[in-house]
Image (spheres, helix red, strand yellow):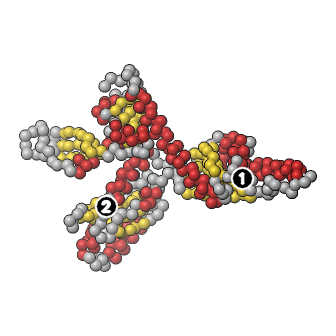
Amino acid sequence: MTELTQRQKYDLKRQLEELKACRGRHTELISLYIPPNKQIHDVTSYLKNEYSQSQNIKSKTTMKNVLSAIESIMSRLKQFKQPPENGIVFFVGHKSIGSDKTDMVAYVIDPPLPINIFLYRCDSTFFIEPLEEMLVEKEIYGLFLIDRRECTIGLLRGNRIDLLKYMTSHVPGKHGRGGQSQRRFERLTELAAHEWFVKCGEQASEIFRNQKEIKGILVGGPGPTKQFFIDENYLHYEVQDKIVETFDTGYTDEYGLKELVSAASETMSNLKISKEKKLMKAFLKEITKSKGSLSVYGENQIRRALQIGAVDTLLLSENLRKYRIKLKCPSCNYIEERTISEDDLKNFSPEACPKCNTQSTMEIVEKVDLIDELSDLAEKIGSKVEIISLGSEEGDSLYSAFSGIAGILRYPIDL
Ligand SMILES: [Zn+2]
């Protein structure tokens, strides 16, 4: 599997946001990446070595903090006989919480894709690049450049461009020597061009047909040759069907591949957004219906619709930034659930229990990201969940006009 689900992407993004916000007062935040094939006892002996070296750290507090972070990782490692399927990542250390104070944090992350490096780093920030890398789109596009002189075939994987084949032709220039042989010369030229196109078509068809994961093919080159090549069906029909669009590029060599990708970047991001747009449009269209509407919005309404299993697609804004929390009274065990914004959670002040008349204050006993909580409810009844990004008119309106939560129903219900 090379592509993460929307949910995995969202969860990883949120974790990385949290990690990014951590700052050590000195180089005392430890990041440890353990790949799946690494022996745990090798990791432990590596850490033991780091532990003894860290005893030479000059600053007393920094040394103490680093040592306790390593201890914490070592004790957590004891729970493992071997690393999990995708390996495991630890982020442990004392993060600064202002005015000379620090707070010990420990994150253990089960990565959604395999870790392929063993890495230990002690710094004033956590090292998150390998995890960030997992968020990069891994979609594969075929790249094809053609004119009468050159042909280049490549692949775009995420942000990486791979050159697969470069060919040059022997097709003479269009203008011959004139005179009597002009017509014959033109005929020979066109024959040579035809053979050249056949060869390019065969090569490209073979390469692209072997890449089953290709999402689309981008075609480039200067002038009208590329369109002629497509119109004359030099490509296998399966490959032909995958052509997304043609773009003008100045070059048809390796440099041309870069030109092509940058020319096509808008088209590619539109492809991704267009699916989200379509869903939001379907939702907005239902809203205008006075009878039998299949749209639902408002958190309470959505919850009720989920409860009775009536939600077909749940639309959640990527920027929702809310939590579902469970409050519990320690004296009478009264429990209350509520949704709270990220900011309100940060400034949460204890409340008295509304049920019993003791001095007890309610404690937060559970905290779940609202997107995760609602997605779980939706998955239980087999609804689709779509996380909608900001940046399009429709995506923005979900966030601002509908508080980031909406749904399309399976059948009309009375709420
Ligand atoms: Zn109580």
**Location of residue 329 (image quadrant):** top left
The location of residue 311, given as percent across then percent down, is 39, 31
Against 103, is 46 above or below? below
Return the mark for residue 147.
1
Q: Residue at x 16, y 41 (%)?
A: 333
Against 334, is 311 above or below? above
How crowded is the residue under tag 2: few (<14 C-alpha within 10 Å), some, or many (20+)?
some
Q: Quick one: quadrant of the C terminus?
A: top left
For the residue pair 166 and 304, the one nearer the viewer reads as: 166
* Res. 383 visible in picture: no
Question: What's under tag 1, amino acid-wise?
Answer: Asp
How crowded is the residue under tag 1: few (<14 C-alpha within 10 Å), some, or many (20+)?
many
The location of residue 357, given as percent across then percent down, is 7, 40
Q: Which residue is mark 2?
A: 22
Q: Is residue 6 left or right of residue 262?
A: left
**Contact between labelled residues 1 and 2, with CB atoms less than 8 Å apart:** no
Q: Residue at x 25, y 49 (%)?
A: 343
| In this rendering, the label closer to the viewer, 2 or 1 | 1
Question: What's under tag 2, amino acid-wise?
Answer: Cys
Which comes sooner in the sequence, label 2 or label 1?
A: 2
**Location of residue 170 (image quadrant):** bottom right
> Dot 2 lies on which element?
loop
* Res. 335 visible in picture: yes
Q: Residue at x 69, y 50 (%)?
A: 223
